[in-house]
Image: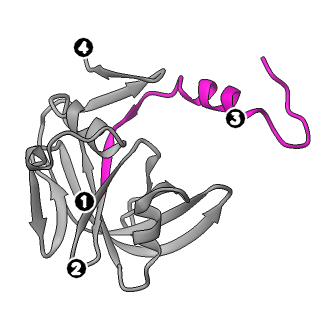
Amino acid sequence: MTSSGPEGIPPYEFRQTLGRFASGVTIITATDGQERRGMTASAFVSVSLTPPLVLVSVDHRAHMHALLSEAEVTRFGVSVLSSAQRHLSDHFAGRPGPEEAVPWFDHEGLPLIGGSVAQLVCRKEQVIPAGDHTLYLGFVEYARYTDDDPLLYFRGQYHELG
C-alpha cells in the first residue's frame, strides 16, 4: 500500500488500484462533418436519470479530446461493446485493425458502432477540466440496447460474463 503525499498516490499505484474496478468497454464517437472518429473508453458513468445524463473522461492527448473541444462538435456517441467486439476495443485504443472491419452506422449524422450492446447519442451539456483529462457531460437524446452480453475490463484484461 502506498500512502498519499502532497501530490497524491503515484500514477502506477492509482492505475493498479482502480484496475480492480470492473467496467464495461465503450467506444466514444464523434464527427467533424468530414471524418468520423472513435476512442475506447472505460471511464464512462451514468450521472442522472432525470434529466438523462452521462459522463465520459477523455485524456488531453487523445485525438478525441481535440475533436470534442471544437465548438461546432455538439454531440457525441457512446457504444457499449458486446463480448464479441474485443477487436473493436483494440482498434480504437491505438492498435488498429482494418478500418473496413468497423461496423459503423449513422444515427442522424452521428457515427455509432453497430452490433454493440447499447448505443447512446449525447448532446454536449458541460465540459469540465479535470487534471490531465476533460470530463464531457452529455444529455442523452437517443438510446437503444440489446440483451447481448457486454465486454468487461478488469485488472488490465478483457473478460466476459459467466
Residue drawn at x 24%, y 14% is 162
Q: Earlier in the sequence, mark 4 or mark 3?
A: 3
Residue drawn at x 47%, y 64% is 65
Relative side of 39 to 155, left or right: left
What is the CA distance from the residue labelled 4 to the residue labelled 3?
A: 31 Å
The residue pinned by badge 1 equals 120
Q: Earlier in the sequence, mark 1 or mark 4?
A: 1
What is the CA distance from the residue labelled 1 to the residue labelled 4?
A: 26 Å
Neighbour tally class for label 4: few under 14, some 14-19, many 20 plus, Cα within 10 Å: few
Does 4 lie within the magenta span?
A: yes
Residue 84, by quadrant, is top left
Does 59 lie within the magenta span?
A: no
The residue pinned by badge 3 equals 11
Q: Earlier in the sequence, mark 2 or mark 3?
A: 3
x, y percent for residue 52: 36, 65
Give the SS element for disc 3. Answer: helix
The residue pinned by badge 2 equals 33
- What is the span of residues highlighted in magenta in the rendered image? 1-28
